[in-house]
Image (cartoon, rainbow, N blue to C red):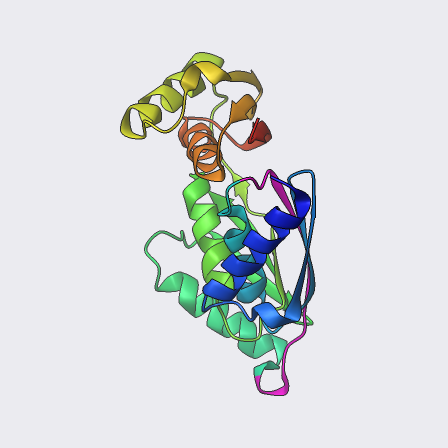
Amino acid sequence: MSDGELQGRVIDELFWDPKVHAAEIAVFADGGTVTLRGTVGSFREKREARRAAERVHGVKSVTNELTVHLLTEGRRKDAEIRGDVLQAMALDSFVPSSIDARVVDGWVTLTGTADKQYQREEAEFVAGNVLGVAGVDDQVELRHPEPSADDVKHSIEKALKRNASVDADALSVDTHGGTVAVTGSVASWAEHDAAIAAAWAAPGVTDVEDHIVVGS
């Protein structure tokens, strides 16, 4: 697929997604790497634009350079934003009470601890959906015993039995302390996400280094 064809497909996907104002986004493609530039009205829209681009077949990586510019009606005081973020997290059973938030100029910084990566991801997702948020910096730490490579490999293999789209033999796993490095190649971003999610699910993982190549 040529860069022009890939660029056109990503543009079409952005226009198809009702959560994204595609007319405000410029798309550039270079050898499978897609760059998004322009201005969007919320942090959530910036996140959704990246997801839309990643759905397109042939996209190997996405560089999201979109700038969040809150419209007048979306601008709110930091204290109000923080209150809504804390309330939203409190109402979500997946987010532990050990996670806190502070807000400066619309940017939310999440701090505290969590037991599982999905809890940290949920907190970031919830915070990013609050009106007036310009960005989210996730500094939540995971508290776990150190994992072993066998534990992580076993976790991935179990996940792959539930998701036949990923070939476990194409991936290798190395661990150092609580950090896991996953290396190899997959055919799509869906396969990539399944493998990374499986690595995070292993006991003791506090960080995942993603060295998976998409589309090779």
- Which image quarter: residue 72? bottom right
Relative to 59, 16 lies left or right: left
Name the residue: 66% across, 49% down.
4
- Please say if 72 is above or below 161: below
In magenta segment, residue 15: no
Q: Tell which of 64 and 95 is nearer to you.
A: 64
Residue 126 appears in view:
yes
Query: Residue sitting at 58 percent across and 76 percent down?
Result: 79
Tell me residue 121's x, y (percent).
47, 48
Residue at screen point 48% across, 35% down: 188
Q: Nearer the viewer, residue 5 or 171?
A: 5
In the figure, is residue 121 to the left or right of 215?
left
Which image quarter: residue 181?
Answer: top right
Of residue 182 and residue 133, the one placed in the foreground of this image is 182
Residue segment shown in magenta: 58-73
Indicate whether 123 appears above or below 150. below
The reply to whether residue 148 is visible in this rendering is no
> Measuring 64% from the left and 77% from the top, which residue is drawn there?
70
The one nearer the camera, 152 or 17, is 17
Give percent across and percent down for residue 112.
Answer: 54, 49
Q: Please provide percent x and percent y for residue 180.
A: 55, 24
Report x, y in % for residue 100. 52, 58
Magenta residue check for 69: yes
